[in-house]
Amino acid sequence: MNKNLYALFASRFPKDKAAACMILADGRVWTYGDIDRASARMANLLVALGLQRGDRVAAQVEKTPEALVLYLATIRAGMVFLPLNPAYQRNEIEYFLGDAKPGLFVCRTQSLALGNELAKAAGVAHVLELTDSGTGSLIDAAAPYSDDFETLKRKRHDLAAILYTSGTTGRSKGAMLTHGNLAANAKTLHAYWHFGPDDVLLHMLPIFHVHGLFVACHCVLMNGTAMFFEPKFDPARALKLLPESTVFMGVPTYYVRLLQSAEFGGACCSQMRLFISGSAPLLQETFDEFKQRSGHTILERYGMTEGGMFTSNPYIGERRGGTVGLPLPGTEVRIVDDDAVLLKHDVVGNIQVRGDNVFVGYWQMPEKTKEEFTANGFFKTGDMGRMSKDGYISIIGRSKDLVITGGLNVYPKEIEELIDAMPGVLESAVIGLPHPDFGEAVTAVVVRKTPVGAGDTLSVSESTIVEVLKAQLANFKIPKRVHFVTELPRNAMGKVQKNILRQTYGAN
Ligand code: AMP
C-alpha cells in the first residue's frame, strides 16, 4: 500500500471536491479540488525540473495557500520539504542551503537576489519566486503542467520533511521526519481531539513550523473540512472569525492577546468546541482567566519538531492547568534520571519519548542522532518534567535551562511559578548568569502587571519578590538579582528567548 502522506490525505478528502479547504481573508476559497489540481501541477513541475525522489525542496516564503500547495506537491512527488522561517537572514539561509543542499529553493521577491547568490554558492540548481500574494515564477512555471499527477509510492520510512529545530539553544539541527512519522501523529491527533464533519479551524499560526504546518493543517486535511487560513495572528480578525469557527490552535501569547481585548468573551465563542495551546508553557493565570471569560477550558498539549505531539490534556476528562496532559496513544513517555533509571511519580527528571511519530534522526549528524537516542529507541527530548500519580505530565524546563549554582541544581520553572503567582507580576523568566563564587547566579527577569485602574497599587519590587521567595524556598534558589522589563523577548513560536536575557544581563 502507498504510504505517501498525500495519499492518506487524499483518501480523506471530501467526495464533493468543490468543498472548501481554505477560506482566505479576502473571501477567496480554495476547494479540495483546487488543492489537488494545483499540487499536481506543481509536482509535475518539480519532476520536470529534474528533481529526484528524496531531493530537498526548501521554501522561505510567506504563509499563502500556494505555500501549503508547494508542501503537498513536494511530498506527492516523493521529495522532501524544508520550510524556513521568513525572518531568517543571510547567515542562517547560507547555513541551511549549505547543509541541506536542496534541489530547489523557493523564496520571496525581497530575498530573490540573496537567494540566487547563496543558492549558487551552495550548488542549488534552481531558485524560484513565490510572492507574498501567492504569485511569481513558481506559479508561472507550474501553470502549463497537467492537473493530474500520480502520487508517488512511498514507504513508511521514506523522508517527507526536514524541519530545522527552532534553536533557542545551540545550532539548528535538521530533524528528519518520514511519511510514517507524520501520518502516525496526524491520525492520532485527528481522533484524539474529536475532529468531525462540522469542524472549521481558525488557522493563524505560521506554516514553517510543526505547530501550524503539521498539527493544524494535518488535522484539517485528515478531516476534509475547511479552515480560515489567515496570514498571521491578529486579535481583531480572531474576534471576527471565532463566531464562525469551532477549533482554534495557538501559542500562549495568542491567548494572552485575546484576553487583552475587552470584546473577547463567551459570546464570540458560541460555536467553538476546542481551544488548543502549545509550543510554550501556558500560564495558570491565562488558563484560569480564559475559562472565566470564555467558558472554555484550554487544552494544552506538548510536543516538538522531532516528533510532533507527545502528550495532550484529554478531550473528555480533566484538562489540568499547568500540565501538558497525558501521553498520546501510540507515544510512550517516560521520566528518567541521568542514568536512565525510571523515576517515581512527582520526581523531576528527563523526558524521553518513543513512538511511530518520533523522527528518525538529524540530517547528516549520525553522531548527534546516536547521542540523542537510548539503546532501546527512546528519544531524549532535553525537556525536564514530572508525572503525577495519575499520569499528567508537567514541563519544568529544558535540561540546558537548568541553573547550577554552588553545585546545586535549580529548576527555573519552580521559581518562575512562585514569582508569577505574586500580586503585581504578569510573568517572569529565571536564568543563570556567570558568577565568580557560585558558577551561576540565579537571576529573575520580571514583567510587572499594568495597573488596571486608578488607585490600583500593583507595585512589586526586587525586595518584595526576594522576601516572598525566602519564605518558600531554600536559600540557594533565591535570585541574587531581579530585573524588571516591560516584555520578555520571545521567538515566533512564543518561546521566551533566555539566551537573549543571558546576553543582556550577563554583561552587567
Ligand atoms: P519546537 O521544536 O520549536 O516545537 O519546540 C519544542 C519545545 O517547545 C519542547 O521541547 C518544549 O521545550 C517546548 N514546548 C512545547 N510545548 C510546550 C508546552 N505545552 N509547555 C511547555 N513547553 C512546551
Image (tube, rainbow, N blue to C red):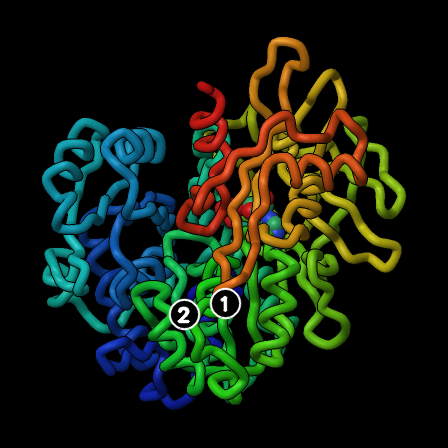
User: Considering depth in this image, is 362 or 340 the residue closer to the camera?
Assistant: 340
Query: Viewed as shown, does residue 58 lie left or right of 356?
Result: left
Mark 1 neighbour class, 10 Å CA radius: few under 14, some 14 to 19, many 20 or more: many
Mark 2 neighbour class, 10 Å CA radius: few under 14, some 14 to 19, many 20 or more: many
Query: Tag 1, which secondary structure?
Result: strand
Q: Are marks 2 and 1 in contact (CB under 8 Å)?
A: yes
Please tell me whether residue 92 is drawn above or below residue 210 in the rendered image.
above
User: Considering depth in this image, is 353 or 456 the residue closer to the camera?
Assistant: 456
**Residue at 26% in and 74% down:** 37
Which of the two labelled residues, at mark 2 and mark 1, occupies the earlier sequence position?
Answer: 2
Q: Which residue is mark 2?
A: 203
Q: Which residue is mark 1?
A: 249
| Type of amino acid under label 2 | His
Query: Viewed as shown, does residue 43 lie left or right of 312?
Result: left
**Residue at 59% in and 53% down:** 424
| Type of amino acid under label 1 | Met
